[in-house]
Amino acid sequence: MVPSDQLPKNYDFAEVEERWRKTWRDEDNYFDKKSKKSQFVIDTPPPYPTGNFHIGNALNWCYIDFFARYKRMRGFNVMFPQGWDCHGLPTEVKVEEINKITKNDVSREAFRKMCRDLTVKNIEAMRLTLRKMAFSTDWSNEYITMMPQYYGKTQLSFLRMLASGYIYQSEHPVNYCTRCETAIAFAEVAYEDRETTLNFFDFDGVEIATTRPELLAACVAVAVHPDDERYQNLKGKTMKVPLFGHEVPVVQDEAVDPAFGSGAVMICTFGDKQDVHWWKQHNLALRKAIDRQGKMTDIAGKYKGLNTTACRKVILADMEEKKILKRQEKLAQRVGTCWRCKTPIEILSEKQWFIRIKPDEILRAAHQITWFPEHMLLRMENWVEQMEWDWCISRQRIFATPIPVWFCTKCGEMAVPDEKDLPIDPTLVKPKLPCPKCGSTSFSGEVDVLDTWMDSSISVLNVTGWDGNGNPPYFPAQIRPQGHDIIRTWAFYTILRSVALTGQKPWDEILVNGMVLGEDGFKMSKSRGNIIVPEEILSKYGADALRQWGAMGAATGSDIMFNWNDVVAASRFQTKMWNITKFALIQLGKGGFDEQSPVTALADRWLLVRLSDTVEQVSAGMEAYQFDVALKAIREFAWDVFADNYIELVKGRLYQQDVSRGSACLVLQTAFDALCRMLAPFTPYFAEECYSYLKGESVHAQPWVTFTYEDEAARREGDLLVQVVAGIRKYKHDAGLALNAPLGKVTIYAPHTVNDEGDTGRTLNADVYWRTDVAKLDRVITDIDFNRSVVGPTFRKQAQAFMTAVKALSPGQLEKPPKTIMLDGVETAVPENAFSPKFSYMEEGAKVDVITVGDVIVTIVKK
Ligand SMILES: [Zn+2]
Ligand SMILES: [Zn+2]
């Protein structure tokens, strides 16, 4: 143990945290492939390398680190890898911004290099934040999805799923962002409420309402309900599309709502999902009126080249001129938008790559996983059950994993590379063999690239050692921690891919964390100005305080509102704990106690009982990923039980040199050691600092606390002891006495004997007598309280006389006042509430103060 005079007076988090960060070795957190211990593999989320590790990430990683550290202390072989999910549009946009170019100004390869360089720089910055926050990352298992080692696996997984029929290419309507110029998946469609105009116009004699008149060029049919009397005559007819003149069939469909507008609707390719449905159902023609840039195509005739908004205006003007626009109404509408750029999505029919979704096998696997909190499984179920379209995995972008296929330019046959040649870019290399069908050697490489979720949805396969040869050695992983905002994407896609590639669930458990809201209760956003960055908290209060905030904020899975007060409270707790540390180390440093000697005193046994309770609560909290429950139990024990009750009670005993001092020292050491170890997952720097003074070893190399102690008598009597002492201390405080001021004689009448080894007397600075008999107290009236607001107005000049008369009453009359009293010879009524007697107690002839604590009566003879 370090001499106590070397302990700094105040805890300097900045100095301590930096010192330990430089001392700790990465190797101590490596997953040991040769270990015989049970594995605990974490499928850590790979964040997008924006350069800023945001507060939502911080919360998620706090959770991960709490259980990673806990599991290590529990003897597991833990893998806490760190990945980086690099590909995607935001980086492309950033590169265009920084270099003042567009992606088309340079070659694909040059553009990719710019994206890679920016990503490398951003990863470097984020790694530093991870280290500052003391996350016990396994850096030997870091992966970066844009690196060949990783995206080679993405390509391998693509080829395997292509071979097994999960992946296919097809022309099919897809969600398309015309600003990003790429297809997107349903999971990437956000929804916004907005107001639009519903336009009623004459469609060849029938009134039709539409919010998107610019789609008139893409009109392929008019639909009515089969039972609608009004349109029986249209059965089997065609109608002429206004302004464009092409003929379209009238179809009958139960899904048409006869009560909406005129009951007739136009079907366009494609206005919405319903159009796609009808288009398939009735086998209608395909008219592409909007292209990939969101401009009108050839079939739009004179409107060709206009964007959709401009086209809408012109068409409406033309309708008005032709007098076919009848009226317009405002309409509230939910519109699907691109989740990255908020542009309203179009549904375009495109040749794209898809993954077949098999809801049953995904649900089966989802049900084999334990969900924390449990209700998050419902979100997955709901999502899977409403799935209608397959997952579109091709993107028309650049910075992404290339789709590893070629097409023969002569016969169109598809060629794939040999698995051992992966990774490849089919736009840069050619197939090694000629076309198997026609023998041609002329190929064109696929220019579409893969959705980034194709990379990140094999993160678990990557960390568990998947290489395509059989099941990965460490698969399935034990846990997937992630936010509830990506259940439909990352969790869903990962389950899908694991089942498709291995036939198994990806993890045993999934832990879903909430979002972090700003101090105003709203989602953090630049426009609200309520963004809190972890670096700011780190510099003001340190990593341990930020980590405590993460644990205490809310139950796992709930959203957390950020609150500076919580961080301040966390920092105060460290100050309190540092004072406890100093006290404990100074006392223990004096030595003179035998670690083998028994714990005898009541307060000591009581503390061990409470410690045992706390260990049980904290362990249960950690096992169930309820970090708020665990840390709350630690804080309450440290602050209320240990510091405010126990230490105050035994201080006096520790200052003297006799046998019972050893018992207190032993308990002090046991409790302090346990506190350090229980705090280690939450406040790794602080716990390390305290423990190093106590034992000169790393707390993170210690096993988890398994202390148990049963002593029902100690619990019962000890609870009584601390309650009584607290009651008397409050009495001292209320009487204006210093807590260490001498008190005199204190007699405590308790229901059972309490042998406190003199702790009560020393802590109260009083002569304390514990008794189990009944207190014999005489109640006497020592004074009278007059209610002047009653006496004054009632008796006026006679008030003094009234009070004199009352004082002359007998004790019995004072307790039960007479109805009248003689005043100057006149019988006068005694008003209610005019006075009340003041009682005092006498015990064995001495005046005593009496307080009660539950059933316990305490008499005090002041000095
Ligand atoms: Zn977009
Ligand atoms: Zn061919």
Image: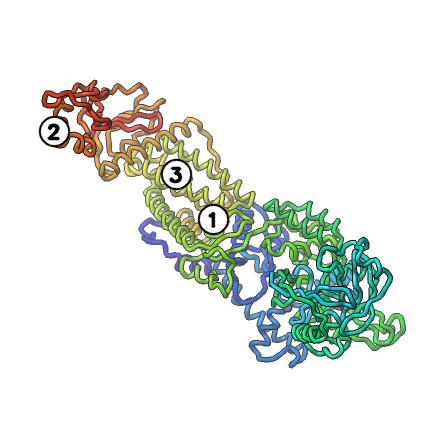
Percent across and percent down for residue 412 are: 85, 72
Q: Quadrant of residue 781?
A: top left
Identify the residue position indicated by label 2 in the image.
798
The Cα–Cα distance between marks 1 and 3, rounded to whole angstroms, is 19 Å
The Cα–Cα distance between marks 1 and 2, rounded to whole angstroms, is 65 Å
Circle on res. 641: 3
In terms of secondary structure, where does tag 2 sit?
helix
Earlier-in-chain disc, 1 versus 3: 1
Residue at position x 62%, y 54% in the image: 43
Circle on res. 284: none
Percent across and percent down for residue 232 are: 83, 57
Closest to the observer: 621 or 88? 88
Percent across and percent down for residue 100 are: 57, 80
CB atoms at circles 1 and 2 under 8 Å apart? no
Circle on res. 552: 1
| In the depicted structure, whether residue 387 falls above or below residue 823 | below
Closest to the observer: 515 or 506? 515
Q: Amino acid at mark 1?
A: Met
